[in-house]
Image: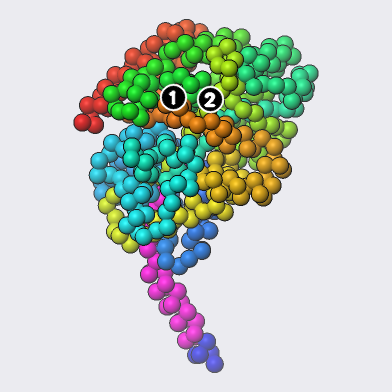
Amino acid sequence: MNSTKSFIAGAAILCSAQTAAAQTEIDFWHAFTGRLGDLVAEQVETFNSSQDDYKVNASHKGNYSETLNAGIAAFRAGEQPHILMVFEVGTATMMGAKGAIKPVHEVMAEAGADFDQSKYIGSVKGYYTSPDGNMLSLPFNSSTPVLWVNRDKLQEAGIDPDTDMSTWEQVGEVLDQLKEAGVDCPMTTAWQSWIHLENLSAYHDTPFATKDNGFGGTDTELALNGEAQVHHISKMGEWARDGKFVYAGRRNEGGANFRAGECALYTESSAGYAGIKSEAEFDFGVRPLPYWSALADEPQNTIIGGASLWVMEGHEPEEYKAVAAFLNFLSSAEIQAKWHQDTGYLPITAEAGELTKSQGFYEETPGTDIAVTQMTAKEPTKNSKGLRLGSFDQIRGIIDEELEAVWSGDKDAQSALDSAAERGNALLRRFEQSSR
Protein backbone atom coordinates (compact mmCIF):
# COMPACT_ATOMS: atom_id res chain seq x y z
CA MET A 1 0.00 0.00 0.00
CA ASN A 2 2.78 2.35 0.93
CA SER A 3 4.65 1.52 -2.29
CA THR A 4 1.48 2.24 -4.27
CA LYS A 5 1.08 5.60 -2.58
CA SER A 6 4.72 6.36 -3.24
CA PHE A 7 4.30 5.46 -6.91
CA ILE A 8 1.23 7.69 -7.25
CA ALA A 9 2.95 10.55 -5.46
CA GLY A 10 6.02 10.16 -7.64
CA ALA A 11 3.93 10.04 -10.78
CA ALA A 12 2.10 13.19 -9.73
CA ILE A 13 5.39 14.99 -9.11
CA LEU A 14 6.73 13.82 -12.49
CA CYS A 15 3.55 14.91 -14.25
CA SER A 16 3.69 18.27 -12.52
CA ALA A 17 7.33 18.70 -13.52
CA GLN A 18 6.56 17.80 -17.14
CA THR A 19 3.66 20.29 -17.18
CA ALA A 20 5.87 23.00 -15.74
CA ALA A 21 8.60 22.19 -18.26
CA ALA A 22 6.10 22.42 -21.10
CA GLN A 23 5.07 25.92 -20.11
CA THR A 24 6.30 28.77 -22.28
CA GLU A 25 7.69 31.51 -20.05
CA ILE A 26 7.85 35.23 -20.86
CA ASP A 27 9.31 38.20 -18.99
CA PHE A 28 7.35 41.38 -18.21
CA TRP A 29 9.24 44.40 -16.87
CA HIS A 30 7.24 47.14 -15.18
CA ALA A 31 7.62 50.28 -13.07
CA PHE A 32 5.10 49.72 -10.28
CA THR A 33 5.62 49.40 -6.55
CA GLY A 34 3.28 49.72 -3.55
CA ARG A 35 -0.41 49.21 -4.10
CA LEU A 36 -0.08 49.34 -7.90
CA GLY A 37 2.73 46.78 -7.78
CA ASP A 38 0.51 44.49 -5.72
CA LEU A 39 -2.29 44.81 -8.26
CA VAL A 40 0.01 44.00 -11.17
CA ALA A 41 1.24 40.93 -9.28
CA GLU A 42 -2.39 39.93 -8.78
CA GLN A 43 -3.08 40.22 -12.51
CA VAL A 44 -0.05 38.11 -13.37
CA GLU A 45 -0.97 35.47 -10.79
CA THR A 46 -4.55 35.35 -12.09
CA PHE A 47 -3.32 34.83 -15.66
CA ASN A 48 -0.78 32.19 -14.70
CA SER A 49 -3.31 30.22 -12.70
CA SER A 50 -5.99 30.47 -15.40
CA GLN A 51 -4.16 28.18 -17.83
CA ASP A 52 -1.22 25.75 -18.05
CA ASP A 53 0.42 26.75 -21.33
CA TYR A 54 2.13 29.99 -20.40
CA LYS A 55 3.80 31.63 -17.45
CA VAL A 56 4.50 35.34 -17.05
CA ASN A 57 7.43 36.40 -14.89
CA ALA A 58 6.96 40.00 -13.76
CA SER A 59 9.85 42.16 -12.55
CA HIS A 60 9.95 45.70 -11.18
CA LYS A 61 12.74 47.72 -12.82
CA GLY A 62 12.51 51.08 -11.08
CA ASN A 63 10.52 54.19 -11.94
CA TYR A 64 9.30 54.92 -15.46
CA SER A 65 12.60 56.43 -16.64
CA GLU A 66 14.65 53.66 -15.08
CA THR A 67 12.45 50.95 -16.60
CA LEU A 68 12.79 52.44 -20.08
CA ASN A 69 16.56 52.71 -19.70
CA ALA A 70 16.75 49.15 -18.39
CA GLY A 71 14.85 47.91 -21.43
CA ILE A 72 17.12 49.77 -23.84
CA ALA A 73 20.26 48.46 -22.12
CA ALA A 74 18.88 44.92 -22.09
CA PHE A 75 18.12 45.01 -25.82
CA ARG A 76 21.64 46.16 -26.61
CA ALA A 77 22.94 43.24 -24.56
CA GLY A 78 20.57 40.76 -26.23
CA GLU A 79 18.77 40.14 -22.94
CA GLN A 80 15.55 42.06 -23.52
CA PRO A 81 12.26 41.09 -21.87
CA HIS A 82 9.29 40.08 -23.97
CA ILE A 83 7.10 42.92 -22.65
CA LEU A 84 8.35 46.32 -21.48
CA MET A 85 6.24 48.97 -19.76
CA VAL A 86 7.08 52.41 -21.21
CA PHE A 87 5.54 55.67 -20.05
CA GLU A 88 3.71 57.76 -22.60
CA VAL A 89 6.53 60.26 -23.09
CA GLY A 90 8.74 57.40 -24.29
CA THR A 91 6.42 56.60 -27.21
CA ALA A 92 8.41 58.49 -29.86
CA THR A 93 11.63 56.95 -28.53
CA MET A 94 10.20 53.44 -28.88
CA MET A 95 8.82 54.19 -32.34
CA GLY A 96 12.28 55.33 -33.39
CA ALA A 97 13.99 52.24 -31.95
CA LYS A 98 14.22 50.41 -35.26
CA GLY A 99 14.59 46.66 -34.87
CA ALA A 100 13.88 46.78 -31.15
CA ILE A 101 10.10 46.54 -31.06
CA LYS A 102 7.51 44.24 -32.57
CA PRO A 103 4.21 46.11 -33.09
CA VAL A 104 1.33 44.70 -31.08
CA HIS A 105 -0.92 44.36 -34.12
CA GLU A 106 1.74 42.15 -35.77
CA VAL A 107 2.18 40.06 -32.63
CA MET A 108 -1.55 39.41 -32.48
CA ALA A 109 -1.90 38.65 -36.18
CA GLU A 110 1.03 36.21 -36.25
CA ALA A 111 -0.25 34.47 -33.12
CA GLY A 112 -3.72 34.10 -34.67
CA ALA A 113 -5.18 35.91 -31.66
CA ASP A 114 -8.65 37.41 -31.62
CA PHE A 115 -7.72 41.11 -31.63
CA ASP A 116 -10.22 43.85 -32.45
CA GLN A 117 -8.44 47.22 -32.45
CA SER A 118 -11.75 49.09 -32.71
CA LYS A 119 -12.79 48.10 -29.18
CA TYR A 120 -10.13 50.30 -27.57
CA ILE A 121 -11.12 53.85 -26.57
CA GLY A 122 -10.02 56.20 -29.35
CA SER A 123 -8.55 58.91 -27.12
CA VAL A 124 -6.35 56.28 -25.49
CA LYS A 125 -5.55 54.10 -28.49
CA GLY A 126 -4.62 57.07 -30.68
CA TYR A 127 -1.58 57.80 -28.57
CA TYR A 128 -0.06 54.44 -29.42
CA THR A 129 -0.98 53.91 -33.07
CA SER A 130 0.92 54.32 -36.31
CA PRO A 131 -0.24 56.81 -38.98
CA ASP A 132 -2.16 53.97 -40.68
CA GLY A 133 -4.13 53.35 -37.49
CA ASN A 134 -2.49 50.13 -36.31
CA MET A 135 -1.62 49.70 -32.66
CA LEU A 136 2.10 49.72 -31.91
CA SER A 137 1.79 49.03 -28.19
CA LEU A 138 -1.02 48.06 -25.85
CA PRO A 139 -2.45 50.77 -23.57
CA PHE A 140 -2.13 49.46 -20.03
CA ASN A 141 -2.29 52.08 -17.33
CA SER A 142 -3.81 55.20 -18.84
CA SER A 143 -4.77 58.08 -16.58
CA THR A 144 -5.63 61.73 -16.84
CA PRO A 145 -5.25 64.55 -14.29
CA VAL A 146 -8.04 65.59 -11.93
CA LEU A 147 -8.39 67.77 -8.84
CA TRP A 148 -8.39 65.86 -5.56
CA VAL A 149 -10.10 67.57 -2.62
CA ASN A 150 -9.67 67.07 1.13
CA ARG A 151 -13.27 67.76 2.08
CA ASP A 152 -12.52 67.78 5.80
CA LYS A 153 -9.81 70.41 5.36
CA LEU A 154 -12.21 72.67 3.47
CA GLN A 155 -14.87 72.18 6.12
CA GLU A 156 -12.43 73.08 8.89
CA ALA A 157 -11.52 76.26 7.01
CA GLY A 158 -15.19 77.26 6.81
CA ILE A 159 -15.50 76.46 3.10
CA ASP A 160 -18.36 74.43 1.65
CA PRO A 161 -16.73 71.14 0.53
CA ASP A 162 -19.06 71.13 -2.47
CA THR A 163 -18.12 74.62 -3.61
CA ASP A 164 -17.67 74.91 -7.36
CA MET A 165 -14.03 74.71 -8.46
CA SER A 166 -14.57 74.12 -12.17
CA THR A 167 -12.36 77.07 -13.09
CA TRP A 168 -8.93 78.19 -11.94
CA GLU A 169 -10.47 81.54 -11.08
CA GLN A 170 -12.71 79.77 -8.54
CA VAL A 171 -9.77 77.71 -7.27
CA GLY A 172 -7.90 80.97 -6.69
CA GLU A 173 -10.73 82.24 -4.49
CA VAL A 174 -10.68 79.01 -2.46
CA LEU A 175 -6.90 79.25 -2.05
CA ASP A 176 -7.32 82.78 -0.68
CA GLN A 177 -9.79 81.50 1.90
CA LEU A 178 -7.60 78.55 2.85
CA LYS A 179 -4.61 80.81 3.33
CA GLU A 180 -6.64 83.23 5.46
CA ALA A 181 -7.81 80.29 7.57
CA GLY A 182 -4.20 79.40 8.35
CA VAL A 183 -3.90 76.25 6.21
CA ASP A 184 -0.20 75.57 5.65
CA CYS A 185 -0.69 73.67 2.39
CA PRO A 186 -3.66 75.01 0.44
CA MET A 187 -2.62 73.21 -2.77
CA THR A 188 0.13 70.93 -4.05
CA THR A 189 0.65 69.00 -7.27
CA ALA A 190 2.20 65.96 -8.85
CA TRP A 191 3.77 65.77 -12.33
CA GLN A 192 3.92 69.54 -12.86
CA SER A 193 4.82 69.47 -16.57
CA TRP A 194 2.21 66.85 -17.44
CA ILE A 195 -0.62 68.59 -15.57
CA HIS A 196 0.20 72.29 -15.67
CA LEU A 197 1.65 72.55 -19.17
CA GLU A 198 0.89 69.48 -21.28
CA ASN A 199 -2.70 69.01 -20.12
CA LEU A 200 -3.21 72.74 -19.60
CA SER A 201 -2.47 73.18 -23.31
CA ALA A 202 -4.75 70.38 -24.50
CA TYR A 203 -7.57 71.42 -22.16
CA HIS A 204 -7.51 74.92 -23.68
CA ASP A 205 -7.09 73.58 -27.23
CA THR A 206 -3.77 75.33 -27.71
CA PRO A 207 -0.62 73.68 -29.11
CA PHE A 208 2.15 72.42 -26.88
CA ALA A 209 4.30 71.86 -29.96
CA THR A 210 4.06 72.38 -33.70
CA LYS A 211 3.30 69.63 -36.23
CA ASP A 212 0.18 68.57 -34.30
CA ASN A 213 2.20 68.14 -31.11
CA GLY A 214 4.68 65.94 -32.93
CA PHE A 215 2.18 63.54 -34.51
CA GLY A 216 2.89 65.20 -37.86
CA GLY A 217 6.63 64.56 -37.87
CA THR A 218 9.86 64.81 -35.95
CA ASP A 219 10.58 68.31 -37.32
CA THR A 220 8.50 69.80 -34.53
CA GLU A 221 9.20 72.70 -32.19
CA LEU A 222 7.89 73.44 -28.71
CA ALA A 223 5.09 75.99 -28.40
CA LEU A 224 4.70 75.76 -24.64
CA ASN A 225 5.55 79.43 -24.15
CA GLY A 226 2.31 80.81 -25.59
CA GLU A 227 -0.30 83.09 -24.00
CA ALA A 228 -2.30 80.36 -22.26
CA GLN A 229 0.73 78.63 -20.73
CA VAL A 230 2.33 81.90 -19.57
CA HIS A 231 -0.96 83.03 -18.03
CA HIS A 232 -1.29 79.83 -16.00
CA ILE A 233 2.33 79.52 -14.89
CA SER A 234 2.38 83.20 -13.90
CA LYS A 235 -0.59 82.66 -11.61
CA MET A 236 0.90 79.47 -10.20
CA GLY A 237 4.08 81.42 -9.49
CA GLU A 238 2.11 84.05 -7.58
CA TRP A 239 0.40 81.33 -5.55
CA ALA A 240 3.77 79.73 -4.81
CA ARG A 241 5.24 82.98 -3.52
CA ASP A 242 2.11 83.61 -1.42
CA GLY A 243 2.27 80.14 0.15
CA LYS A 244 -0.98 79.04 -1.51
CA PHE A 245 0.75 76.52 -3.76
CA VAL A 246 3.34 74.28 -2.09
CA TYR A 247 5.76 72.57 -4.45
CA ALA A 248 6.84 69.11 -3.26
CA GLY A 249 8.73 67.60 -6.20
CA ARG A 250 8.83 66.67 -9.85
CA ARG A 251 6.98 63.38 -9.72
CA ASN A 252 4.20 62.55 -7.26
CA GLU A 253 5.96 63.44 -4.03
CA GLY A 254 3.07 65.76 -3.13
CA GLY A 255 0.85 62.71 -2.82
CA ALA A 256 2.34 61.86 0.56
CA ASN A 257 1.40 65.31 1.85
CA PHE A 258 -2.13 65.06 0.51
CA ARG A 259 -2.71 61.50 1.74
CA ALA A 260 -1.44 62.54 5.18
CA GLY A 261 -4.17 65.19 5.33
CA GLU A 262 -1.82 68.18 5.16
CA CYS A 263 -3.03 69.71 1.87
CA ALA A 264 -6.53 70.79 0.90
CA LEU A 265 -6.24 70.54 -2.90
CA TYR A 266 -4.06 68.29 -5.03
CA THR A 267 -3.74 68.08 -8.80
CA GLU A 268 -2.74 64.53 -9.65
CA SER A 269 -3.49 61.60 -11.91
CA SER A 270 -6.86 59.90 -11.65
CA ALA A 271 -4.75 56.88 -10.68
CA GLY A 272 -4.00 58.59 -7.40
CA TYR A 273 -7.24 56.91 -6.34
CA ALA A 274 -5.50 53.65 -5.35
CA GLY A 275 -3.18 55.28 -2.82
CA ILE A 276 -5.63 57.89 -1.57
CA LYS A 277 -8.34 55.31 -0.96
CA SER A 278 -5.98 53.04 0.98
CA GLU A 279 -4.20 55.71 3.05
CA ALA A 280 -6.40 58.80 3.52
CA GLU A 281 -8.09 59.05 6.91
CA PHE A 282 -10.27 61.95 5.81
CA ASP A 283 -13.26 62.48 3.55
CA PHE A 284 -11.95 63.10 0.04
CA GLY A 285 -13.51 63.90 -3.29
CA VAL A 286 -12.47 64.21 -6.92
CA ARG A 287 -13.30 67.05 -9.31
CA PRO A 288 -12.58 67.75 -12.97
CA LEU A 289 -9.31 69.48 -13.74
CA PRO A 290 -10.07 73.24 -13.61
CA TYR A 291 -9.77 75.47 -16.68
CA TRP A 292 -9.36 79.23 -17.13
CA SER A 293 -12.67 80.83 -18.12
CA ALA A 294 -10.61 83.84 -19.22
CA LEU A 295 -9.00 81.65 -21.89
CA ALA A 296 -11.81 79.35 -22.99
CA ASP A 297 -15.60 79.26 -22.89
CA GLU A 298 -15.39 75.59 -21.96
CA PRO A 299 -12.63 73.01 -21.68
CA GLN A 300 -11.64 70.70 -24.54
CA ASN A 301 -10.35 67.34 -23.30
CA THR A 302 -7.42 66.28 -21.20
CA ILE A 303 -4.77 63.86 -22.46
CA ILE A 304 -3.48 60.64 -21.01
CA GLY A 305 -0.50 59.83 -18.89
CA GLY A 306 0.61 56.45 -17.69
CA ALA A 307 2.19 53.78 -19.85
CA SER A 308 1.69 51.17 -22.52
CA LEU A 309 3.16 47.72 -23.04
CA TRP A 310 5.69 47.31 -25.84
CA VAL A 311 6.66 43.92 -27.23
CA MET A 312 10.39 43.51 -27.84
CA GLU A 313 11.93 41.83 -30.88
CA GLY A 314 14.25 38.83 -30.72
CA HIS A 315 12.07 36.08 -29.29
CA GLU A 316 10.60 32.79 -30.49
CA PRO A 317 7.16 32.42 -32.17
CA GLU A 318 5.81 30.31 -29.31
CA GLU A 319 6.84 33.02 -26.86
CA TYR A 320 4.98 35.63 -28.89
CA LYS A 321 1.88 33.43 -28.66
CA ALA A 322 2.25 33.65 -24.89
CA VAL A 323 2.60 37.43 -25.17
CA ALA A 324 -0.57 37.62 -27.27
CA ALA A 325 -2.50 35.50 -24.78
CA PHE A 326 -1.38 37.68 -21.86
CA LEU A 327 -2.18 40.98 -23.62
CA ASN A 328 -5.63 39.70 -24.58
CA PHE A 329 -6.17 38.68 -20.96
CA LEU A 330 -5.23 42.18 -19.77
CA SER A 331 -7.65 43.70 -22.30
CA SER A 332 -10.63 41.57 -21.27
CA ALA A 333 -13.62 43.50 -19.94
CA GLU A 334 -13.53 41.79 -16.54
CA ILE A 335 -9.82 42.40 -15.91
CA GLN A 336 -9.98 45.96 -17.23
CA ALA A 337 -13.05 46.82 -15.17
CA LYS A 338 -11.40 45.54 -12.01
CA TRP A 339 -8.16 47.41 -12.81
CA HIS A 340 -10.11 50.64 -13.43
CA GLN A 341 -12.06 50.27 -10.19
CA ASP A 342 -9.02 49.34 -8.10
CA THR A 343 -6.67 52.02 -9.42
CA GLY A 344 -8.47 54.97 -11.00
CA TYR A 345 -6.78 54.29 -14.33
CA LEU A 346 -9.05 54.59 -17.34
CA PRO A 347 -10.75 51.49 -18.73
CA ILE A 348 -9.03 51.01 -22.10
CA THR A 349 -12.09 49.48 -23.77
CA ALA A 350 -15.68 50.61 -24.03
CA GLU A 351 -16.82 47.22 -22.74
CA ALA A 352 -14.84 47.63 -19.53
CA GLY A 353 -16.38 51.05 -18.93
CA GLU A 354 -19.88 49.72 -19.57
CA LEU A 355 -19.28 46.75 -17.26
CA THR A 356 -18.06 49.09 -14.51
CA LYS A 357 -21.19 51.20 -14.89
CA SER A 358 -23.50 48.16 -14.85
CA GLN A 359 -21.80 46.95 -11.67
CA GLY A 360 -22.85 50.18 -9.95
CA PHE A 361 -19.30 51.34 -9.23
CA TYR A 362 -19.84 54.94 -10.34
CA GLU A 363 -22.97 55.26 -8.20
CA GLU A 364 -21.20 53.84 -5.15
CA THR A 365 -18.08 56.00 -5.60
CA PRO A 366 -19.15 59.38 -7.00
CA GLY A 367 -16.52 61.17 -9.05
CA THR A 368 -14.68 58.09 -10.25
CA ASP A 369 -16.21 58.53 -13.69
CA ILE A 370 -14.89 62.08 -14.05
CA ALA A 371 -11.62 61.02 -15.66
CA VAL A 372 -13.46 58.96 -18.28
CA THR A 373 -15.85 61.82 -19.07
CA GLN A 374 -13.00 64.32 -19.24
CA MET A 375 -11.26 62.19 -21.87
CA THR A 376 -14.23 61.13 -23.96
CA ALA A 377 -16.85 63.91 -23.85
CA LYS A 378 -15.31 65.69 -26.84
CA GLU A 379 -13.64 64.49 -29.99
CA PRO A 380 -9.92 65.28 -29.64
CA THR A 381 -8.47 68.05 -31.80
CA LYS A 382 -4.96 68.22 -33.24
CA ASN A 383 -4.02 70.09 -30.05
CA SER A 384 -5.63 67.61 -27.67
CA LYS A 385 -4.86 64.22 -29.18
CA GLY A 386 -1.68 63.88 -27.17
CA LEU A 387 2.06 64.45 -27.53
CA ARG A 388 4.61 62.52 -29.53
CA LEU A 389 7.98 64.17 -29.02
CA GLY A 390 11.44 62.68 -29.14
CA SER A 391 13.68 62.86 -26.06
CA PHE A 392 10.61 63.96 -24.12
CA ASP A 393 11.79 62.52 -20.83
CA GLN A 394 14.84 64.79 -21.00
CA ILE A 395 12.70 67.71 -22.17
CA ARG A 396 10.49 67.24 -19.13
CA GLY A 397 13.59 67.52 -16.98
CA ILE A 398 14.33 70.90 -18.60
CA ILE A 399 10.74 72.03 -18.05
CA ASP A 400 10.94 70.97 -14.41
CA GLU A 401 14.06 73.07 -13.91
CA GLU A 402 12.45 76.14 -15.45
CA LEU A 403 9.21 75.74 -13.49
CA GLU A 404 11.16 75.41 -10.26
CA ALA A 405 12.80 78.74 -11.07
CA VAL A 406 9.31 80.28 -11.33
CA TRP A 407 8.11 78.73 -8.06
CA SER A 408 11.20 80.08 -6.25
CA GLY A 409 10.77 83.54 -7.74
CA ASP A 410 14.05 83.42 -9.67
CA LYS A 411 12.35 83.76 -13.07
CA ASP A 412 9.09 85.09 -14.43
CA ALA A 413 6.87 82.70 -16.37
CA GLN A 414 7.60 84.10 -19.83
CA SER A 415 11.39 83.95 -19.55
CA ALA A 416 11.27 80.50 -17.96
CA LEU A 417 9.03 79.04 -20.65
CA ASP A 418 11.02 80.75 -23.42
CA SER A 419 14.12 79.11 -22.02
CA ALA A 420 12.39 75.73 -21.78
CA ALA A 421 11.33 75.98 -25.41
CA GLU A 422 14.81 76.95 -26.61
CA ARG A 423 16.57 74.24 -24.62
CA GLY A 424 13.97 71.63 -25.51
CA ASN A 425 14.13 72.46 -29.21
CA ALA A 426 17.85 71.71 -29.19
CA LEU A 427 17.03 68.16 -28.02
CA LEU A 428 14.28 67.82 -30.62
CA ARG A 429 16.75 68.73 -33.40
CA ARG A 430 19.19 66.15 -32.10
CA PHE A 431 16.42 63.52 -32.02
CA GLU A 432 15.31 64.47 -35.53
CA GLN A 433 18.86 63.94 -36.85
CA SER A 434 19.20 60.57 -35.13
CA SER A 435 15.87 59.40 -36.57
CA ARG A 436 16.90 59.91 -40.20
| Residue 300 circle label | 2
Q: Residue at x 42, y 21 (%)?
A: 208
The N terminus, quarter of image: bottom right
Q: Badge 2 local density, few (<14 within 10 Å), some, or many (20+)?
A: many
**Image: 189 above or below 243:** below
Residue 110 in percent (x, y) is at 32, 57
Residue behind mark 1: 383
Quadrant hosting residue 64? top left
Outermost residue, bottom side? 1
> Residue 9 lies in magenta, yes or no?
yes
Q: Are marks 2 and 1 in contact (CB under 8 Å)?
A: yes
The C terminus, quarter of image: top left
Q: Residue at x 28, y 44 (%)?
A: 100
Three-letter amino acid code at disc 1? Asn
Front-lying residue, 19 or 165: 165
Q: Badge 1 local density, few (<14 within 10 Å), some, or many (20+)?
A: many
> Residue 24 lies in magenta, yes or no?
yes
Front-lying residue, 385 or 286: 385
Magenta part of the chain:
6-31
Q: In the structure shown, which secondary structural element does the residue marked by tag 2 occupy?
A: loop
Q: Residue at x 51, y 11 (%)?
A: 231
Residue 167 in percent (x, y) is at 62, 18
Q: Is residue 287 visible?
A: yes
Three-letter amino acid code at disc 2? Gln
Q: Residue at x 69, y 16 (%)?
A: 174
Quadrant hosting residue 371? top right
Display colour scheme: rainbow
**Image: 339 above or below 181:** below
Q: Is residue 237 visible?
A: no
Residue 235 in percent (x, y) is at 56, 11
- Of pointers 2 and 1, the one earlier in the residue sequence: 2
